[in-house]
Amino acid sequence: MTALHETLAELVSIHSVTGNEGRLCTAVAKRLLPVWTMQSVARIGNTLVVGQQTGRPLISLFGHLDTVPIQDNGEPVIADGRMSGVGTADMKSGLAVMIHLLEDDAVRTGPYDVVGVFYDKEEGPSDENGLEAVLDKAPWLAESEFAIVLEPTDLAVELGCNGAMNAELGFEGKAAHSARPWLGENAVTKAGAWLAQMHERQPEPVMIDGLEFREVFSVTRAEGGIANNVLPATLRVNLNYRFPPVYSMEEAEQRLLEVAAAADWVAVKDRAPAGVVVEENLHLDRLMAVSGSERKAKQGWTDVARLSGRGIPAINYGPGDPALAHQAAESVALSSVDTAYEVLREFLVDGQEDSSDELARLLGEDED
């Protein structure tokens, strides 16, 4: 194994299911402290901010330390050029790349102040996400000219992200003996027409700057009834809504309420904003040129939304296939990890264009 692959194996071996990131946070701190010193490594709970501002343009790298629960895949296994194990794709391969970039002298002394943020509780509820506290306590991160969230993208450059909202819907009936249903009202069958409509509902494509996002409503849970011989008086349904970055939170909630109008009551339980699509950013242009990657929309939710909400131009780029995330058979191609590291190293070290010259070119200003 290469040093990069060994780092990934070590990270996978340190289990860090959401809420239990402390041991991994400590391990990353011990790894990077000898390189960055105490003045440049700040621990905020189980989150690390590695690097500092020195006056160069600031580029920040973000990766979450936690994984979903272990599914008999707690140890790294290498076979056929892949490493399997919990978090290999989402997103310990991205963390390994971040660590090696932050240890690279050429990156540390290059044209940018490169800062790495390793944060906790991304896989849990949005309001518990550890990145929010970091952005509050290190407001200087908002001065980043560009941010890269190393979520798995299969080496595509993914822009923006859909917002996410969950609401509980209630359909109310009246309990009765199942032998005499005319004395009550069945809440489950009352909801049948609406559920059938939702079953047939298709994703709605929304184009933004040439990128296709899909607006999606999905019924993800249903609960009703108390016994086999009692008509259910209530049916509770969870409606999950993924909305593209053309809608504000208020507009998205209004659209959800319109779709859920057949319910007797609706309670929005949690919501996270969509992420802004970065446009006209010289760093994005350089990353596209260096990587040669496909430019895509991010259909799922990532912390690009949280960063763009703070005014930070942010994109998703990382090793690993997102389709394998959260699965018992989760794995990553080691070649994908290598490529992500090589691309980002070149982007941070050798991909520098003189910004003033490039800005003049874009504005059409000719030299005398």
Image (cartoon, rainbow, N blue to C red):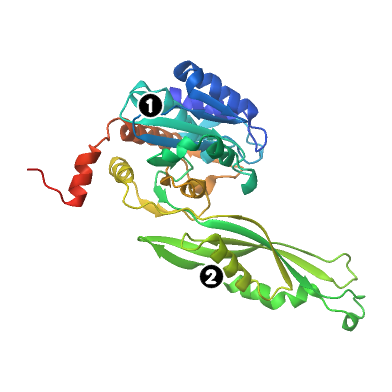
Are discs 2 and 1 less than 8 Å apart at CB? no
Front residue of 175 and 128: 128
State which tag comes first along the sequence, 2 or 1: 1
Identify the residue under disc 1. 54
SS class, disc 1: loop
- Side of 64 relative to 365 (left or right): right
The residue under the point 33% across, 23% down is 109
The residue under the point 64% across, 59% down is 166
The residue under the point 55% across, 60% down is 249
- What percent of the width, then of the height, locates residue 151? 49, 42
- What percent of the width, then of the height, locates residue 267? 70, 63
Q: Quadrant of the C terminus?
A: top left
48 lies above or below 18? above
Residue 319 visible at all: no
Q: Quadrant of residue 20?
A: top right
**Three-letter code, disc 1:** Thr
The residue under the point 30% across, 29% down is 111
- What percent of the width, then of the height, locates residue 70? 66, 38
Front residue of 342 and 302: 302
Front residue of 139 and 211: 139
- Side of 10 relative to 355 (left or right): right
- What percent of the width, then of the height, locates residue 168? 71, 63
SS class, disc 2: loop
Residue 161 visible at all: yes
Identify the residue under disc 2. 202
**Three-letter code, disc 2:** Gln
The CA span between labels 2 and 1 is 50 Å
